[in-house]
Amino acid sequence: MQLIPYILKHTQLPEQSVANTIALLNEDCTIPFIARYRKERTGNLDEVQLGSIVQFKTAFEALEKRKAAILKAVGEQGLLTPELQTRFQNCEDLATLEDLYLPFKKSKKTKAETARKNGLEPLAKIIMAQRSDAIEFIASKYLNNAIQNEDEALEGARHIIAEWINERSDIRNQLRSQLERFALLSTQVVKTKKEDEKAQKFRDYFDWNEALNRCPSHRFLAISRAEKEGFIRVKVEIDDERAIEKIERRIIKSHSDCASQIKLAIADAYKRLLLPSLSNEILKKAKEKADTEAIQVFSKNLKQLLLGAPLGEKRILAIDPGFRTGCKLVCLDAQGDLKHNETIYPHAPQNDSKGALKKISSLVDAYKIEAIAIGNGTASRETERLVKRIPFKIDVEVFVVSEAGASIYSASKIAREEFPNYDVTVRGAVSIGRRLADPLAELVKIEAKSIGVGQYQHDVDQNKLKTSLDTVVESCVNSVGVNINTASVPLLSYVSGIGPKLAENIVAYRNTNGAFTNRDQIKKVPRLGGKAFEQGAGFLRIKAGDNPLDDSAVHPESYALVKQMAKDKQVPLSDLIRNKTVLEGIDLKKYCTDTIGLPTLKDILEELEKPGLDRREKAKVFTFDQNIKEITDLRQGQLLPGIVNNITNFGCFVDIGIKESGLIHISNLANTFVKDVNEHVSLHQQVIVKVLDVDIPRKRIQLALKQS
């Protein structure tokens, strides 16, 4: 099996596109770079399609690595024939490969191995031949010091036969197919844990069963967590009689005495070897499928969150609200630098609202504040109401900002390096203010899984989760572009071709030599070679620099082409940019070459029309219903404004301004069938919801989306 046919089988993408993409990947090109600047070579594949090529390339390499290990192991046993080698090499998936390898595994001491040592393998072969009607008499010939009677001899032979049955790939595939189609997932509560308070959140699964292939990912992960924490037991069930009968039809070919022995061996093989092994396998596959779906949900949410609406370069007063410990205030300039911080105590127990109002008002005046960001945690609503009472001399917009992950950032190494002389409360408030200005630039500093927009993110495969989320962050950062003169190390590290070490070198060079004035200077950064420059230059922006193209997504490799366009139109380069009339008159076909075609040329023209445009929406002010302060204020039928703060496969959660978020179940999202929640709502979307039900003891709120 070769790499390209393997990928084509799983993706149905054009062969030339796959071949060229693999060549680019082998040249250490990144997905964002390939998607943006090598469209001609890939046939205009997008990042998702390129990602699938990477995924199956990785899977193929893992399969080939396992084949090599198995071939070596079987070869060392002296059992590798040319035919067997071909069978191993032709395997296209791990399950088939492992089935084929099963007879050659050096297993621990088994019942079959003991029987072989006791000389019973010839007897097992006689039974499998199914030609004898005097099997007990034959068995008597195999008695020895270890085998005392015929029953023991037959039992040992059956253990060997059971192992043979277990190793047959046709039988394993048959049972695997039955499990995939008919397996029932059942659960039972551990009696000693039934009254455990922590177990109560899993009480729906104390006695649960459903078809495994219809169990949604969120429910499977919930059941897996309950089992892991020791509250329930999980097992896989199918129709045992039917499964055993199918095996018997494959093996038993006579009505001799041997048939009854084989029947016993089949039952033993099924119960002791086949079912436990393949049940674990199918549960593992179900877990992998659930993980994949959960990671996809998390990735979609993270992308929406990272590409959330930025307020832009504004002077911001950020407030991390609290009761007893007070509200931490920080003033940030338009670049997000900390200019001032202090604490006010407007709420209980101090109740110094008069002093707090005066202080906020004076800070707004002193630092020419344009917007106020209030964290959405404890005392958020009370602080918002307080701030909105202040008669500011100028228009100051007030925003409530998600605090998710702010505490993780404030205690992190990154935060300590940014603010070594400030405590975690100051750092947390700075993070709240900065994420209003630019969510992407601030959220990249927080481990993605700590941002709180997934489902069961701590239960899925953590390596796969990290890989997927890193890919999402990289895609978002490069789609927006990065100001090289203001970006932090974490933000720069996600730029195509850069990485953490080069990001540190860029910032160190910037601190020593001052701001970059053109992209050519980037080549002077220590250890930043030609490949890194090629991969990253198009995503690094220089505002108000020597060359106007440096603040655009036009790659330096295309600068000569753009200059030729300007020359042909007889205008200076600066007059070509943003000049829609001139740009519309350019005949792109005239500039096509062997390496640059219409897809790239259209991208260049689009970028020249609006260079450096941030395609994200701008932040909008939002106000919750001021009469709703806690869950007891809710009533059935109320219509309330809310913000979508998490999306799952089974619905979405909405912040309605109190501690508890409400759930819009997928069945209450629309009047028609909903296949994908993301087609109806997006993260941070402002919505109007209807209260359907309030369960105060369990702190659960059921909502419906008000149809516009």
Image (cartoon, helix red, strand yellow):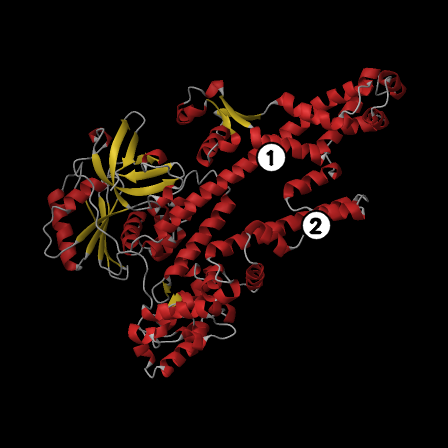
Mark 2: which amino acid?
Ala
Compare residues 47 and 75 and report the one nearer the observer. 47
Looking at the image, can residue 162 be seen? yes
Residue at figure coordinates x 38%, y 63% from the top left: 481
Q: Nearer the viewer, mark 2 or mark 1?
A: 1
Disc with the residue nearer the chain's start (2 vs 1): 2
Q: Which quadrant would residue 376 be assigned to in this image?
A: top left
Mark 1: which amino acid?
Glu
Compare residues 463 and 162 and report the one nearer the observer. 162
Say which residue label 2 marks.
Answer: 68
Query: Considering only vertical position in the picture, is 129 above or below 557?
Result: above
* Residue 455: image location, x then y, percent: 41, 39
Crowding around mark 2 (Cα neighbors within 10 Å: few <14, some 14 to 19, many 20+) is: few
Residue at figure coordinates x 30%, y 72% from the top left: 580
Query: Considering only vertical position in the picture, is 44 above or below 198?
Result: below
Residue at figure coordinates x 47%, y 25% from the top left: 231
Real-space CA distance between mark 2 and mark 1, rounded to the nearest whole angstrom: 22 Å
Say which residue label 1 marks.
Answer: 281
